[in-house]
Each structure stands twice: as structure tokens, then as C-alpha cells.
Amino acid sequence: MSVDLSFVDQCVAEIGDRPEAVIPLLQAIQSHYRYLPQAALQRVCELTEITPAAIQGVSTFYTRFRHRPMGRHHIQVCRGTACHVKGAGLVEEAIALHLGLAAGEDTDPKQQFTIEPVACLGCCTLAPVVQIDEDTYGRLSALTVTPTIREFERRVRLQKSAKQSSNNNSADTVTRAKEVIEKTGEIRVGLGSCCVAQGSGEVFKRVHEVVAAIGCNVEVKRVGCVGMCHQTPLLEAIRHDGSSRLYCHVQAEQVEEIVRQNFKPVGFASRLRSSWTHWVAELYGSEIGRDTAIEPVSATTGPVSEFLGPQKRIATQASGDIDPLDIAEYQRHGGFVALQRCLHELSSDEVIAEIQQSGLRGRGGAGFPSGIKWAKVCSALADRKYVICNGDEGDPGAFMDRMLLESFPYRVIEGMAIAAIAVGAHQGYFYIRAEYPLAVQRIRLALAQCHAKGMLGDAMMGSDYALELSIKEGAGAFICGEETALIHSIEGGRGTPRIRPPFPAESGLWEKPTLINNVETLSLVPWILRHGGSEFAKLGTATSKGTKVFALAGKIRRGGLIEVPMGVTIRQIVDEIGGGVADGRRFKAVQIGGPSGGCVPAVLADTPVDYEALRSVGAIMGSGGMVVLDDTDCMVDIARYFLRFTQDQSCGKCTYCRIGTKRMLEILDRICEGTAKKGDLNALEELCHSVSAGSLCGLGKTAPNPVLSTLQYFRDEYEAHLNGHCPAGRCKGLIEYHINDACIGCTLCAQHCPVDAIPMVPYAKHVVDIDKCTTCDTCRVVCPENAVQIVKRSKK
């Protein structure tokens, strides 16, 4: 099939022909053609300085690039930690079964759907999560896969070629009218990614429609992440007297009642129209609100108060109050005051002194003191320096950076600009995961506003300082969260780390001194400069100052984005903020720090959130993913899950990481499948220490952490697996499904079994054909009598 190459010519003209343009060019080409046609790649080589070897190396390294055509619709299945523990594997199997995919295939025979696993979509509180094109679906199960795909197909048919991108950008395209008439109230709708995935985009649209139809003089405002992801969609009504009402789990059909509860029509014509609408509705027996009653929740007592109470908001200050892209509103909340001071009042040394006094440590990994890093870059002698915001949040189970970028883009930009001024950099880059399209979009729009208002560019805020900031999108490589790998990616290469020293502060991007901080670290900087480093240092512990943002997810009642003072205990977070685990379940452990972290058992839940304290129990703070596990989770399976992730994401540069993690995974596979021997545990521990000691970068050095921590605290589960038993009933190689005498012969299990492993025998006890059964768990979920049991697999 011939390919129109005019688009390639256009891309090269717009993006550039230098070697560092290779990743943006490939991203643009794939976005247009939906894969990388060989003819298009050859054309790039003809027009640019990019070699075929460079294109081959880069395009096969990053997982986002595809070399063969894909279906009309793209199904991305999240494999993040929260999704994994809530059954993402079963969902992925159900999708493949529904599409009729043969082994090794990812596109259905009709070329309608292509399925692709993704490390993390950043909607952990809605796990398991699947994204079809631009639409995100949360809380799926193997049972709901087929109706979800059919509903998507139905909507596509109804709207034909119209894309359902309103869930991602309708909120950004709606312009709030700036009327001269004084508003009598305000309606706020949360529009972070989790909110959007749960339908807040439709709620926001409906609020506009209702306000216009009724004639209320009310301002409708989008806000960013409120943190209470477990309550989405969220709507807050602020009335003329300043009182507010918060509504949770709002549906579009409930919006009119909420508006009428809180606001009155303005003007005679509006009141008459409203009265007429009610009269007609009552006449025809369809009184408004009859079937859509909704009551506000209390923000001072109950679950909302418990969730918010222990928190201290600095990085997430004004959460739920401000429009993410309203620069004037950000300024009314103290925005750019710190930047103004840095440009006109404070010297670089004074700015760095405040950061050092604050005790701020990097929030993206091991917690290196930010002030020391800033001072090192500042003192480096070079004709050019760079600053980079590391937004490549690749940890499965983490979504802090995504929320901050989406909800507080100006705060992160201000923090980055202050950092650049402090170290003497005049150019900087936001490196953001391509899997976070809303974050990319909002940062791009916010940067444009900052340029238009003189906050960036030449003569910033009337000073003689110039700063240019731009965006580089990642292409799907977890290793690019490592500083030197990220630098190679921006330069247009494969994301492979290098030996340090020299550190990026001395020789970084294009061998120039480079300051790299993650999103959360930079978002704290404006507050520190406004209030003083000493005020920040009053929060936290002796060695871990300030606050920490966590993504609280997994087997927890109240998941979401939280920000707590350093030093609070794990138990306070799980029980007080998160509300504990579900009734009838037992809190077992919490996994902290992602693939580089560890599993902290419930008996150590009084461990404080502190860099050193967490390290002492075998975990790390990391970027802040916190996934709660209960007694239905298998700790051996959790260890295997993380090792499978790191082994898959290894760049392959060093032998210990490339081969060592592979051998470790082989042992864990044998343990979970019931074919391991007792000596395997000793071999596994030895490999853990060797890989940790011999790997080049942080990915390999910390890859054994989940294995070591589970071996330390849950060795009895490993021993049980060696004896052919998975105590949690999660490892498929060690379990099978049986139906007991409680069966009433309702046939629901047989009706829903996707592989016909249960013969339909009405009013008789059913039997599972073990040879056909895929252990998808559907029969157990649908059984109304709890007659389906998970038992130890019998030996053949």
C-alpha cells in the first residue's frame, strides 16, 4: 500500500532535521499514520541528518512506537500496580477473548481493535482501567468487558467519525463568559483525569446547559484534582452568601436538581420560563428531580472530613478552588509573587539559601537534598546551562505528577522558572509521559499564557532575564525516569543511563550543567519562596522536611491524591485518611515506592513516612505510589509482578540487570506455577544481592527490593508455594475452581463462562471442567450462592 509522504515533508519542515529531532518526528509520523510506515522512515533519512541506524535503534527501544498497522480503535489496558491487584490480567484476557485474538496477535481479524498493555495510565483509583481511543473506563471486570466494548461501538456508530475527545478536552475548550453582571454564585466541577474518566466532562457540559436554560446568574468553573478520586464526579455549589455544598458521584441527569436546589433564576423572563418548565413537568407526571434526588455531603464531618483532616496542602494548595488554566486566578492566589522576588529582589545565592534552609529533598526517588543540587549547578562554569522538569512518572501505581501537571500547571512552571534563575539556566524542558495527554495539553496551554503575559521569554516580568521553556514527550520507557537516560532521550537517543560521575549537575544535556527536578519538587518551590524556608522546615521530621504527595490506591476505601506532613505513619494514612480496607478483609501490607520500593507489612504500619524510616524497613519513598494490599493478595505474585515490570523495562545495557533480573523472574515463575524446588529461594536471594550490587543505574540496583522485602516479611507464603499452595488463591498454576453443594442450578455461571467450561444443567449442581477452565474468576463473581470455591490444584 502506497503512503502519502507529503506529511513527512511537512513534519521535517516544522520539527527540524537535526539528530535530536528523531523522537518528535517519529511521534508525529505515528500519530498521523497510526504506525511507522517503512517508506515514511526512509523519507525522514533522505531529508534529515538522522541515519537509518538511529531510527531503527530509537523506534525499537521505546514501547510507544509501532511498526505494523493497527486497528481502527486502540485499546490500552493498564498494568499498573493497583490495576494488577484488582484483576487487570483477567480484564486483558477477557478483551482478547472477546476480540477473538489468536496467540501472539494484538489486532482482531476485522482490523477494528488493537489491544496494547500499558505500564500505567495514571488512574489508579479507578482500577482496573482500560482506555479505548480517548475514552477511559474504570472499575472494569472480566464480566463487564463485553458490554463496555459494545457500548463504545454503539456510540461510535451513532456519532460516526466524530471523536469522543470531549472527555479529555471539552473542559479546555469551553470558555467562561466574563460578564459585567455580578455573579450570584459559582459552580465548580472537578476535571482531573480520574474525574473525566468517571464522567465529569458530561457533568460540566450539562451544568453549562442548565444554567443557560434556567437563567441563573452563576459562574461555571472547572477546577483540577480535588484529591477525592473515590468520590468522582464532584460538583461544588457556592451560593451568594458564601456557603457551599459538595456533591459526590454526580451524574449528568442530576445536575438540574442540584442547580435548582442552590440557585434561583434571575429576571422576570427567566423566572417565568422556570415556572413554566416545572408546571409542564408536573402536569405530565415527570416532576424534575423525582428520580434523580441527590443530597450534598458534609465537608466538616464524616468521610470527607476524615479524608481531608490530616492533610496539609502545599504542592496541592488551593485544590478544588482554581481553574488550572486561569492565570489571573493563579495570581490572585499568590501565583508568580515568588518569581517576581527572584527576578527583582533576591540573588541566586539567596534563593538557593532558602531552598537549603527549607530542607527540601527531591520528591522523585531517593530524596537527594535539592539545595545541594541547585548550588552545584549554580557554581558550575559553562556558557550554557539547562533545567529539566522530570515528568516521566513511570512507576505503576503512581499518579502524583500527572495530577499536579493537570491541576497546577502554573505552579510547576513558576517553580521551574525560579530554579532556572537560581542556577543561571536560560532554557528548560518539561519531559512528560506521552501517556498523559491532558497533562501535556495543559502545560502547553499554560506555557503559551505565560509567554503572552510576559512571565516567560525575553525580559521576564520586566527584568533583563530571558527564559524559554518547552515540552518533550516521552515515548514509553520507564528507564527515562533516570536522569541520564532522560537526557539521552531529549538528545534523540535511546534512553540508556550512563556511569556517574560526572553527574548531570556537571555534565548533563549536551554535556552542559543541567538541573533536573521532578514535578512535585518544583511545585513546592513557590510556597517556600513566599513563606520562607524556615516555615517549610517546621513541617516534617528531623531529616525529612515539609509535605509529601502520595497516590493512595489499591484495596482501600478512600483512594485518591493526598498530601501529608512528613512523619505521619502508614497506619494514619491507611486507616484515618483511606478509611481502611473493605469489610471482611484484613489489611496485609502496603507497597511503597513502586518497582524500586518494597512491601511494608501491617505489623509495621506505625512506621513514619520518612526517607530513612522507610529505608530501614526495606522500602523507599520513591515518587510516592502507595498501594494498599489485603488478605486476598499474594505477596509472591506481587514480587513477580514488579520483577516482570523491571525486567521488561530494563534497557539491557548492563549484564546484571539484563540477565540477572531474567533469572530471578524465571525462579519466581516456577514458584508461582508450583514447579520450584527448595533451593530456589536461596538462589533467588543470592541473585537479588548480586543484581543490586552490580547494576549500573537505580532501576537495576533497586529491582530486587520488592522481592527482598516480601522474602523478609512473607517467607511463609514462599514456603507454601513450594508445597503447591497459594494461600491467597491468586496464582493460577496452583489453584482450580470447584462448585460445592450450595449450588442451586441457576446456570448463571454456565451462562457467563467465556470458554464453556461449565456445562449448563438447570436445577442441578454444576461442575467445572478443569481442562477447559482459564481461571478467569467470572463464575465465582456471578454466583448468587457463593457456591464457587477456589481450591488447591490437584496433582495429575
Image (cartoon, rainbow, N blue to C red):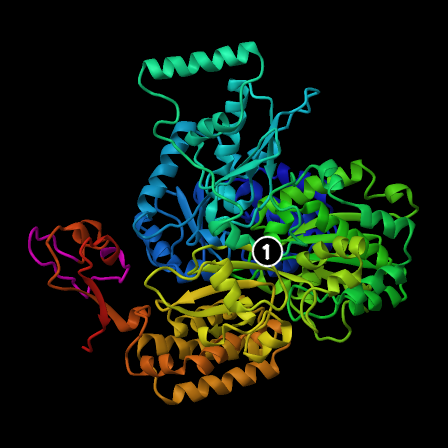
The answer to whether residue 329 is above or below residue 471 is above
The answer to whether residue 702 is above or below residue 495 is below
Residue 428 appears in view: no
**How far from the left and from the top, in percent, is residue 17?**
73, 48
Image quadrant where residue 263 sits: top right
Pick the front one: 143 or 715: 715
Pick the front one: 170 or 206: 206
In this rendering, the count of numbered labels is 1
**How far from the left and from the top, in percent, is residue 133?**
47, 42
Q: Which residue is drawn at 10% across and 63% down?
A: 741
Q: Residue at x 61, y 63 (%)?
A: 623
The answer to whether residue 86 is above or below residue 616 is above
- Left or right: 493 in relation to 235: right
Q: Residue at x 47, y 50 (%)?
A: 302
- Element type where label 1 sits in the image: helix
Q: Quadrant of the C terminus?
A: bottom left
**How far from the left and from the top, in percent, is residue 117?**
45, 56
Magenta segment, prevailing SS (helix, strand or loop): loop
Label 1 amino acid? Met
| Magenta extent | 758-779
Question: Crowdedness of circle 1 by 10 Å Cα count: few (<14), some, many (20+)?
Answer: many
**How far from the left and from the top, in percent, is residue 690?**
55, 85
Whether 759 is among the magenta residues is: yes
Residue 493 appears in view: yes
The answer to whether residue 760 is above or below residue 291 is below
